Image: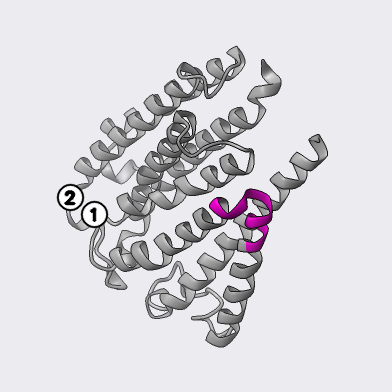
Amino acid sequence: MKRDFLFICLLSVLGILLLACASAALNHIQEIKYDAMMERTRNRPIPSGKVTKLQAWVVVIILAVAGTWLIYLGSGLSGALLGLSAMFWYNVIYTYLKRYSAYAVIPGSVIGSIPPLVGWVAAGGSLSNPHAILIAIFFFIWQVPHFWLLAMKYGPQYEVAGFPVITKVYTRRLIYAFTFIWILATAIIAFMLPYFGVLNSYIAAFGILVSSVWLVFQFSKLYTKHETEFNPRRYFMRLNLYILFVVVLMVTDQWLV
């Protein structure tokens, strides 16, 4: 039984990975013109000429079909539909919106909340379970500051490519404030994971408490730093490290009880 469960999990994880790769490859096709304009992306396979558009389409189709099939085998029809909905949301809705709105990252963050739900379904859970909803909210919220930190680092390149960026809408001080609010919201939702029983061990609860306080403290420094001293990449890595730690706690919680 345990072996079957692990096999199902493996199918779902591989399926999500392949579908995410398909979505990323399709995005490369969609944004060839824009990628060629930005230093950060001009060396990607298609704009650099290493891969043709036709070859990229073949890769997209193979990865999408294989990924969807694996998710279906591991998570059933509902999991496969969730995976495809994430791809649709990213490649159709978000990719379109970000060409016209600096706020596209907010609806775009829905994409990151879907893969955990695929895993939830694969494990036999219901999408109406409050725990699943709370986990999805957590993965939704943290992505907004994640992408805004990228925008602060690569804003000028996005502008050259014609994308509307948050740095052209607000001053950096205001962006710092908005980013801190989203960080605070991320920490609050993380506190709710043990409070509402998503995490059950005292070790995981303590880990959430300490890491969340650390995260909020780190980002509170945004108010004391001069703009020339601010390093978006450093804060970007700290946020990613925090999320990785929380995910590890989620995965290992049952063995920490």
**In the rendered image, which quarter contains the C terminus?**
top right
Return the mark for residue 170: 2
Q: Main secondary structure of the magenta part?
A: helix
Say if 87 sits above or below 234 in the image: below
Say if 192 sits above or below 27 in the image: above
Say if 15 sits above or below 185 in the image: below
Q: Quadrant of residue 128?
A: top left
Tell me, yes or no, if residue 72 can be seen here: yes
Identify residue type, mark 2. Answer: Tyr
Residue 255, image x, y percentages: 71, 22
Quick check: 150 left or right of 248? Answer: left
The local secondary structure at tag 1 comes to helix
Q: Which residues are magenta?
A: 69-78
- Report how far apart the C-alphas of labels 2 and 1 lie in the structure: 6 Å
Front in this rendered view, residue 242 or 89: 89
Q: Is the C-beta separation of discs 2 and 1 under 8 Å?
A: yes
Residue 83, image x, y percentages: 53, 56
Tell me, yes or no, if residue 231 can be seen here: no
The residue to which callout 1 is attached is 167
Q: Quadrant of residue 104?
A: bottom left
Residue 147, image x, y percentages: 38, 50
Q: Residue at x 66, y 66 (%)?
A: 66
Q: Residue at x 61, y 15 (%)?
A: 201
Colouring mode (rainbow / by chain / secondary structure / one colour): one colour
Say if 78 sits above or below 43 in the image: above
Residue 9, image x, y percentages: 70, 44
Front in this rendered view, residue 15 or 48: 15
Q: Quadrant of residue 256?
A: top right
Task: Report if residue 229 lies within the magenta region.
Answer: no
